[in-house]
Image: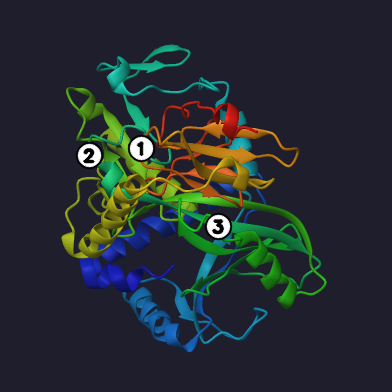
Amino acid sequence: GLIYDRLLQGLGREKAWAYAQANQEAVEAFAALAERFPCDFRRCGSVVYAAEEKDAEQVERELQAALRVGLPAAPMRGQPLPFPVAAGVRFENQARFHPLKFAYALAACLAPKVDFYLHTTALHPRKGGVDGVLHTTAGTLHADNVVVATHFPFMDKPGFYFARVWQERSYVLAIRNVPALEDLYWGAGEKGWSFRPCEGGLLVGGGSHKSGHEGRQAHFDRLEAATKSWYPQREVTAQWSAQDCMTHDGIPYIGRYKQLDGQLAARAFVATGFNKWGMTGSMVAADLISSEIAGRESPYAEVFSPSRFDPGMKAKRFIMENTDMLKNYIGGYMELPPETAASLKPGEGRILQVDGQRVGAYKDTDGTIYTVKPVCTHMGCILEWNQDECSWDCPCHGSRYDVTGKILNNPALEPLGKTTLGEEQGK
């Protein structure tokens, strides 16, 4: 993405270089591991482009910033995408791979020496956690060190992570019967699309927005229409969405979880906020946290530290995101919705008013109605219906639930409460 110009302006060349170097070393670490774990690893370029002239200047600044921090960057050449490109910067010697193939091979290698506890939820310290002991839904574990790598930190009150991290959703189509691409492409600006080669076809992404917002917009339909216009013969083979944790300065929080109480503060670590760059971000986290546990110093620790102080980089985005959070929290309680069950169409979800109370209701295509209390169990925000994915989403912190109230995305730890429409409303 567009980050190095901002880092140079906000943090200076030394820290911008450290961020760049840490991520470049992560690419090489994956390259080394890929020799042991087959995962379709391919060297390629990574391109940030501007589709519109108004965004071209930003991309040009990014090129100059990348060169200043020593990255292998050069102007994009040619027009390989199915539409005109105003400007682009190509980062040489990057890579792409299949993350699930990598993860399964790595897990198989570790299995003889590492215990994996599947389908086991770690519980918040308020439910009985003490130093050196990790309480779970399946029993108690004793640990010298604890790494909280749960996407959004499930212990988010210490350290105020609920105010320092927000979540965004984006959408992807897998298509085939299209011209081949070799490099990775990420579009800057409001009309940016991403393109990634995959198994003889392409993954095309876009439609990024804050979780719990834009629930009535048809993001997959937009992707369908765009790819059809570019590639009339294309075939859609799959579609899915992703949810990513974002930080105010664009840098992940990786390091000691110093805000916890007692001895655990010295033995707990956190990794979150990869800003949609989780491949290299996760490898950086693995290196930094293992170094800390082993007592080795890293030249990159300060840049990623959860306790870092860089107000110039964070202030504007911090104010904007937390103002939005408060607006959604307060606004959800200001008035009751006018809708009743009679207005609910098959395949639709809405918040209804029943006896002066809010009820989240979804009507299946066969007429079955599923009801929940539409209040997020994380911090009490009123939920929004996500029509694309038939889920209840929190506009404050990004928790998501299915139509029965089961958790789909954290930071929520508890499912939604149950409720009914009542005899008259249910007719």
Residue in front for this viewpoint, 93 or 184: 184
Q: Earlier in the sequence, mark 2 or mark 3?
A: 2
What element does badge 2 sit on? loop
Q: Amino acid at mark 2?
A: Gly
Q: Quadrant of the N terminus?
A: bottom left
Question: Which residue is farthest top?
Answer: 139
Residue in front for this viewpoint, 365 or 248: 365
Eye-nearest disc, 1 or 3: 3
Q: Quadrant of residue 64?
A: bottom left
Give how far across and how far down residue 283 sits, in percent.
44, 47
**Disc 1 target residue:** 153
Q: CA distance from mark 1 to mark 3?
A: 28 Å
**Disc 2 target residue:** 159
Eye-nearest disc, 2 or 3: 3
Task: Check contact, mark 2 vs mark 1: CB within 8 A.
Answer: yes
Quick one: label 1, few (<14), some, or many (20+) residues within 10 Å?
many
In the depicted structure, whether residue 89 falls above or below residue 14: below
In the image, is 411 to the left or to the right of 89? left
**Disc 3 target residue:** 216
User: Which residue is depicted at the point 26% across and 71% down?
Assistant: 8
Give how far across and how far down residue 361 sits, in percent.
56, 38
